[in-house]
Amino acid sequence: MNIGLALLFVLAVAGEAVAVAQSWGGGYWLVGGCAAVVACGLALARRWDRRWTAVAGLTVAAGAIGASAVADLPAEPGPALASALAVLVGSAVRVVRAGWAVAIAGGGLAVVAASPVSASAGSAGAVVALNAVAWAAGVTTGATLRLLDARAAATVAAVRQQERLELARELHDVVAHHITGMLIQAQAAQVVARRDPSAVAAPLSGIEAAGAEALSAMRRVVGLLRDHDDAASASPGPESLADLVTRFERQGPPVRLSIVDSSTAGGAGWPPEVTSTVYRVVREALTNVARHAPGARSVRVSVDSGPSGVTVEVADDGPAVAQPSSGGFGLTGMRERVTSLGGTVDAGPGEGGGWRVRATLPPPVLR
């Protein structure tokens, strides 16, 4: 983006210098050319600080207008300087605070209003029109992008809030799962105590281990519920992976489901938050296949549980460009959920074509 913009600025400055030299002669282009070069440099460096680069650019433009009026030079701002100001003002309007955005937009409008000061009577209208169009384009573009950014942020916040509510329901399931196991072991301990009091230690150790596991799981899930910028989103699935695949195949391509470790089929050996995360990854990936890869003829879903953790991979054979790498808000939620559990998510074109989503959960999650 900056390379293209730099080339555009170079062409604008060079074209303006040639035009002024041909019509005015000599070095009449130097003042306006220097001002344009400085403003264009500020526009290229605007990401450093969009507020102060915009203020500096407007100051340069005001100085160029004053110098042109005093020294009887070509009218300013010229096309190159006006283009740079449009980029500076538009970029600032997009991201700075509302008060500063209004002030910078007003400063740009003041430059437009002052531009006739350096112009002759015959060219004043053209100079004002040029700068007014550039200013309007910059402000409109910046305001539009600001609105779109605000809407996207609001949508993400709403999605996260909704899924935190679902996660709160999952917390209930996690607690119920572990407490049920503890109750069963406590009942078993009572039976053992009546038969052989000396053997009670083993069931009590099991209860202690289950309690520690329950606390660890609750900490993980409650941590996801905290209202931070990186808070995760999740929703547990009511179906097994096999049920999910079967339901998908009714309206989509065939799915090959592979669970390498049969002892964990259906997630029976995993904590509830891991089971729901695996389900969520597969569900979201299959949803993206249905939405973005209508040409896919088959889908492969593999779940591998081993010493390195749990790896979930969903790949289709559709066109490689069918799905965007960042997906929608569902992929965002999936990525945040996996990351919050210490894992990673990789989504992109597959080696043999199509699209692939791969999520990995580390071994500590399974303890």
Image (cartoon, helix red, strand yellow):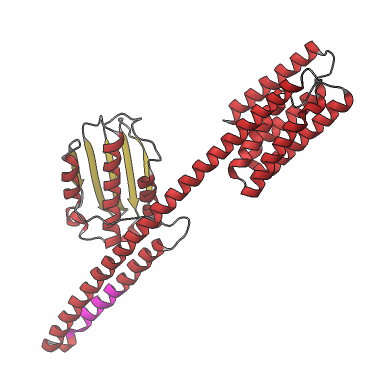
The x and y percentages for residue 172 are: 28, 68
Q: Position of residue 50 (x, y in %)?
A: 65, 42
Asked if residue 203 lies in the magenta stretch, the reply is yes
Tell whether position 148 is magenta: no
Residue 49 in view (yes/no): no
Taking 292 as reference, is 267 left or right? left
Q: Nearer the viewer, residue 33 or 150?
A: 150
Q: What's drawn in magenta, residue-wise?
A: 199-211
Quarter of the view holding residue 194? bottom left
* Side of 5 where 278 appears, left or right: left
Q: Is residue 152 above or below residue 203?
A: above
In the displayed structure, does residue 233 sit left or right of residue 74?
A: left
Q: Residue furthest left?
A: 195
Instruction: Tell me if residue 85 can be seen.
Output: yes
User: In the image shown, does 232 or 258 lie closer to the viewer?
Assistant: 232
Seen in the picture, residue 17 relative to 290 is either above or below; the reply is above
Task: Please report the residue visible at 78 percent of the width from the left and 25 percent of the height from the top.
Answer: 32
Residue 354 to residue 266: above or below: above
Taken as a whole, is the magenta stretch helix, strand or loop? helix
User: Quadrant of residue 191 in the image?
Assistant: bottom left
The quarter holding residue 202 reads bottom left
Measured from the top left, where is residue 33 in percent x and y? 77, 24
In which quadrant will I find the C terminus?
Answer: bottom left
Q: Which of the two residues, 110 or 217, is positioned nearer the viewer here? A: 110
